[in-house]
Image (cartoon, rainbow, N blue to C red):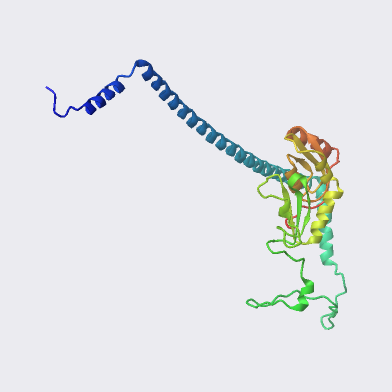
Amino acid sequence: MSSSLDTPGRKLRDEQIRLAMHDNPGQAKRRAIISQVLMESEALVQTQRNLLQHEVQRRMAEELFHDLDLQVQDNVDELTQQVNEVNIHAGKFRSSFTVHGAQVVIAELKRVVATFLSPTRPVSPLSMPIHTQAGTAVTPSRPPPGTTLREEDEDKAFKGDPICPGSRSPAYVVYIGNEGKHGVFYAWSTHKDIIGAFTIYKPTCHTHVICSFSTRQLAHQFYDEFLDSGVAELLAENKPTQDERFIVVEGVAPAAYKNRKSLIMDGLQFRGGVVYRYIGSIEAARSQFNKYKAQGLTQCTHARRTTF
């Protein structure tokens, strides 16, 4: 029995729904394949995104490891140099306990004692003291605590080198900068017409080398020694390589060094010297240096400084 609600329009819609629900197998299979391809494409895109993210993280980790490796190398070189210095001083100390060394020590003690016992000027009786004229000598003094100091016009002539705004020192020497550039600068960053060291030196680049100086004269002195000794030319003529080492036979701390940074900072201590570029392992470079040292061909030209 048909319902009163069965109309021709409703029957047509029901027929369309029935046909849609009973598509032929070919169309259903094509839709399933398309759906599967879309799902696999989305999975592939997500996989590529994950791989790209992992690659970025891997490169960041490699850069961090490289920076840490350079820092470790610098610390190892410094510790090695300190150990070598301790061994040298220990050898000298042990040699003083030989018969000849004891004689030298005794002779030196006698000389010192004789200096104290023999006055350099005649001693007068207490009733007639000798008065010496002070001349131009001035006894160093400082104001009492809590004194307010003001800049006086007469004191300006005794000031040191000016310090540019944004700088902590009056002079900087860049030994290794961008593209191997180097030079003396009177400011950290460019100020007016004074070019700053920051134009060629980047603190984030661990191969760059810079040193600040308390006076411009001292900066030029050290930099001129660096140039005149030929070290700057040696570094400029050869591009840095992973297997290059440096042997200092004349300098502040003669030894073998792993890289250019440790050469300048530790071996030469920002000065000049006699340096050989060595291709090979650091162990082989140290062996070569020991040969020079055994033959008496090494020399410490300057004492190590703690301030500049």
> Does the rendering let one see residue 89?
no
**Count of marks placed on residues:** 0
Q: Is residue 292 left or right of residue 75?
A: right
For the point 14% across and 28% down, the residue is 4
For the point 75% across and 58% down, the residue is 195
Figure quadrant of the C terminus: bottom right
**Position of 22 relative to 272 (above/below):** above
Figure quadrant of the N terminus: top left
In the image shown, does 295 or 155 lie closer to the viewer? Answer: 155
Q: Residue furthest front?
A: 8
* Residue 248 rendering spot, x and y as whole percentages: 80, 42
* Residue 28 rendering spot, x and y as whole percentages: 36, 19
The picture quadrant where one finds residue 120 is: bottom right
Q: Which residue lies furthest to the bottom in this view?
A: 127
Q: In this view, does 248 lie to the left or right of 169?
A: right
For the point 69% across and 64% down, the residue is 165
> Does the rendering let one see residue 111?
yes
Q: Is residue 2 left or right of residue 152?
A: left
Q: Residue furthest left?
A: 1
In the image shown, does 57 or 140 lie closer to the viewer? Answer: 57
* Residue 21 rendering spot, x and y as whole percentages: 29, 22
The picture quadrant where one finds residue 52 is: top right
* Residue 98 rendering spot, x and y as whole percentages: 80, 45
The picture quadrant where one finds residue 180 is: top right
**Position of 112 relative to 131 (above/below):** above
In the image shown, does 263 or 76 lie closer to the viewer? Answer: 263
